[in-house]
Amino acid sequence: MQEGQIVHQFEVNDGSITFRYPRWSDLDAFIKMHQTLAEEKVMARRLKLNRDTGGRMLAEALIGLQENRASYLLVEQASDLVGEGFLTRGGHGYFTVGLALLERARGLGIGTQLMNTLEREACRLGAKRLYLTVWSANLVAIHVYQKVGYQECGRRPDWIQMDSGEACDLIEMVKNPIDANLSIS
Ligand SMILES: CC(C)(COP(=O)(O)OP(=O)(O)OC[C@H]1O[C@@H](n2cnc3c(N)ncnc32)[C@H](O)[C@@H]1OP(=O)(O)O)[C@@H](O)C(=O)NCCC(=O)NCCS
């Protein structure tokens, strides 16, 4: 793998979308993208990164890629970073999947393609199973995960306190086995 290498590219309504590995020069845009995700209150991890913490995170992503123990994909639209997806190795042949897109990039099919691309990355890394968690209130994410073949395998009731103050469940999902022949659309 090479820093910045393009992994997948496709067209959506208003232009080209690129999934690529990060490079060190992404640092400022990477921090800004996470700031925006936090401001948008995504139902996913919200990181308030500065150059120190963001730099460590990006360095860890690059090292994980180099050592073939993790994957990290940035989503680029018109030279802007609009999202990311990642895989981290767990125990016993499984990888944990995470992804998030900025609001303006959602609902265009990018999340579905990112899930499929992450799965191909997982195959490359030798994963046997994929695992993720999702808030029960995150209906779009659950729909996408089910669509690409994930199934609920556990649920922690009332585990998450949402911004509204209400609680929702934390759902665990797995995909097993991985389809190594996913088509690239
Ligand atoms: C979850 C996320 C990655 C999905 O990516 P996306 O690009 O928006 O998803 P897609 O456009 O590929 O697909 C959206 C699907 O949800 C469906 N959908 C839209 N509104 C929905 C709703 N209220 N309930 C259920 N499904 C819904 C769409 O019809 C579409 O399904 P289809 O392709 O079968 O028609 C993205 O919305 C996101 O980043 N959200 C914020 C961060 C986040 O929640 N990350 C996941 C944490 S676990």
Image (cartoon, helix red, strand yellow):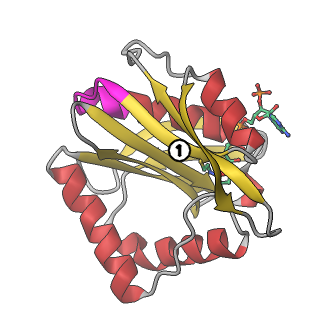
On screen, residue 105 above or below 165 = above
The outermost residue toward the front is 157
Question: Residue 10, image x and y in percent?
Answer: 59, 35
Specify the amino acid type for callout 1.
Answer: Thr
Given the current orientation, which residue lies at the most extreme left position? 67
**The C terminus, quarter of image:** top right
According to the picture, the residue beneath numbered tag 1 turns out to be: 133
Residue in front for this viewpoint, 50 or 8: 50
Which region shows up in magenta? 121-129
Asked which secondary structure carries label 1, the reply is: strand
Q: Residue at the location (76% across, 70% down)? A: 163
Q: Is residue 127 magenta?
A: yes
Q: On the image, which quarter does residue 124 sit in?
A: top left
Q: Residue at x 39, y 78 (%)?
A: 54
Residue 185 inside the magenta-drawn segment: no
- Apparent side of residue 175 relative to residue 155 in the rendered image (left or right): left
Q: Mark 1: is the Cβ under 8 angstroms from ligand 1?
A: yes
